[in-house]
Structure formats: structure tokens, C-alpha cells
Image (cartoon, rainbow, N blue to C red):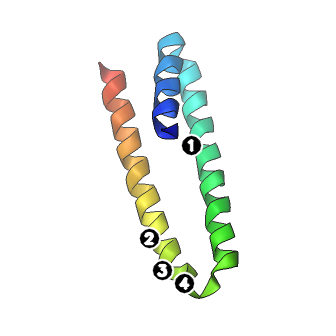
Amino acid sequence: IITLLIHGFLLRANAKNPAHFVRSFTAVIALKMFFFMALLLGYGLMNKPHFGGFAVTFLVMYASFLAFESWALIRALRK
């Protein structure tokens, strides 16, 4: 649900001003990355024995979703 709200926010930002979209996109990606890094760190502190496998899986999923999200935004903005 949060991703859909962010997606809508970014599309509205582009409709208003494309230069504002670049700033908004960069800010959103940075905030999400810091949030997920804190989540990953919190999990690592609470569950050290299983952290390695979780971290690798989490980062692969994060990178995959980031690529999909970027592709979806680019596709929507080309229309």
C-alpha cells in the first residue's frame, strides 16, 4: 500500500514539474533505503545467527523490487 502511495506521489510530482520529480524520486529512494537499512540492522541485532542468509535474501529482493519500481515509473512517465 505504501508503495502505491509513493508511486502516485511520484507521478503527481512529474505532472507538476519534471525537475521536481527528480528531487522527489531521489528523496524517496534515499528514505526507503535508510528505513530498510535500519530494519535490516535491527533484525541483525536481534537474530545474529541467521543474519547472513537473511541479509543476502533481503538485499536481493530489495534490488529486484527497486529495479521493477524504476521500470514501472519509467514506463508510466513515457506515456
N-term-proximal mark, 3 vs 1 = 1
Disc 2 from disc 1: Cα separation = 19 Å
Quadrant placement of the C terminus: top left
Rendered position, 37 above or below 11? below
Q: Residues within 10 Å of mark 2 (few under 14, many from 20)?
A: few
Task: Say what amino acid the circle numbered 3 marks.
Answer: Gly
Dots 2, 4 in contact, CB < 8 A: no
- Pointer 1: what residue? 29
Residue in the foreground of this view, choosing between 73 and 8: 8
Percent coordinates x, y for residue 64 in the rendering = 38, 55
N-term-proximal mark, 2 vs 1 = 1
Task: Say what amino acid the circle numbered 1 marks.
Answer: Ile
Q: Residues within 10 Å of mark 1 (few under 14, many from 20)?
A: few
Which SS class for mark 3?
Answer: helix
Specify the label residue 53 is tagged with. 3
Total numbered labels: 4
Specify the label residue 57 is tagged with. 2
Task: Say what amino acid the circle numbered 4 marks.
Answer: His
Disc 3 from disc 1: Cα separation = 24 Å
Which SS class for mark 2?
Answer: helix
- Pointer 4: what residue? 50
Percent coordinates x, y for residue 6 in the rendering = 52, 33
